[in-house]
Amino acid sequence: MNGSKYILLLLIGLSSSCQILRSDPNRPTYENGANSDTTQTVVKPDETNVPDKPVVEVPKFDQVEFHGEYFHVASRQEQFDVALILPFYFGANNDRSAATSNVMLHYYQGVKLALRELESRGLNLKLHVYDNVNDTSQTKKILDYSQMKKMDLIIGPIIESHLKIVSQFSRKHKIPVFSPFSKVDGLGQANSAFFSTIPSNELKAKRLVEFWEDNYVDHKLLILRDNGRMEKDFVPYLIEALKRSGKLLYSEVEYTTKLDWTTELSRTDENLIYIPSLNRKKVSSSMGKIFAAKRKVVVFGEQSWAQFEDNDYNFWSKMNVHLVANEFIDALDTNNFHFRRYFRAAYQEDPEVYSYMGYDQMSFIGEFLMAFGEHFPMYLEGRSFKYLGTTFEFGMENGFQQNHHLFFLKFEDYKLQRIQD
């Protein structure tokens, strides 16, 4: 064999060896030293016995724009049932019931106008209206109706005792509750799905003291007590908030017609005075005597003072009067002007403050339901939403969601103006 044939046979041999050593993807792996010459039974896994992997549904999220912010919101329902439980007193037979009925009617008119607008924008909501005539047995009877368990939201009723009953129902059936009018100082059991549009006395006291700390920390505060309802309901919370603060010097004085304000007020420093009374005569008498003392003062009172008859707003401007309010209707605001025209066209009368409240609250509720559906409670807390006369700023306080917002108003240029939103 010549040299060239020898080299060719050698190359063929090496190539065959490489093919044998090359990994075959279909070749089984042998254990315990077995080789390819050993007969083996290769058992493939029984794929029919392998458990299926659990199917995990990935929630679908939509991007939602709401009041200038963008949110990712999970799939949500688009049709809603809402119960409205209020003391309408249909067929009222006495003056007190008739007065309450009139307030509820104005609120309901505002609600209906808001619903009309929202439905034109796509809201699909059925409103179920119930009259509980401010009777706890009737409230319980309404809650026993089978359809109540299917509600997506309950608005009302009023009066703390009724709201506690509805809150228990809310906790049991996981239905959010929206309290439209009443201060609620406690529910007995915490309920994060209970929303109160009016701050409790405790929260109001806290917010008022915070405002004074920010603006009048160098002033001495004098609280005029008159043994009225506000003193009994609110002033104890105010005193407690002042004690916790420790930043404001304060004193208390009892109302009498003979009170000498010249001795109670500083001659040189500006005096901060809080008058919680809702009694027109006591307020007017006190204001007159304070003015006669010829001292520099800042007087704080309640928003109901604006409803007193024959108020002398020029005098109130001189007295530097401030009011603490849950809502404020600015008559010169363009949006409020349009609402008044809209309301007059629908009902042939002017709206009252409760008409604005009904309109604002239903607008707020409807917009949230359209944007977030049943998930709406997740998107409320810690944000501020302004409507015609109400600003909503919900946060947990004392076991339930409360609106933290208060308006601080001042008489300037012969009209009431807000000084802080």
Image (tube, rainbow, N blue to C red):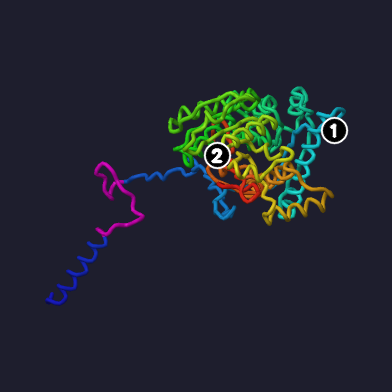
Residue at (49% x, 43% y) in the render: 53
Task: Count how many numbered circles sit on residues in the image.
Answer: 2
Q: How far apart are marks 1 and 2 (CA)?
A: 45 Å
Is 23 in the magenta? yes
Q: Quadrant of residue 309?
A: top right
| Viewer-side label of 1, 2 | 2
Residue at (60% x, 39% y) in the render: 324
Q: Name the residue under label 1.
A: 90
Is 99 in the magenta? no
Q: Can residue 177 be seen in this view?
A: yes
Amino acid type at circle 2 is: Val
Q: Circle 2: is it few (<14), some (14-19), or many (20+) Cα within 10 Å?
A: some
Residue at (59% x, 53% y) in the render: 67
Name the image quarter holding the N terminus. bottom left
Foreground of the two, 331 or 163: 331
Q: Circle 1: is it few (<14), some (14-19), or many (20+) Cα within 10 Å?
A: few
Task: Please tell me which of labels 1 and 2 falls first in the chain.
Answer: 1
Foreground of the two, 133 or 102: 102
In the rendered image, the vertical position of residue 25 relative to residue 287, given as above or below: below
Give how far across and how far down residue 295 sits, in percent.
54, 37
Q: Name the residue under label 2.
A: 298
Amino acid type at circle 1 is: Phe
Q: Give the range drawn in magenta.
A: 20-38
In the rendered image, the vertical position of residue 302 relative to residue 414, given as above or below: above
Residue at (65% x, 38% y) in the render: 303
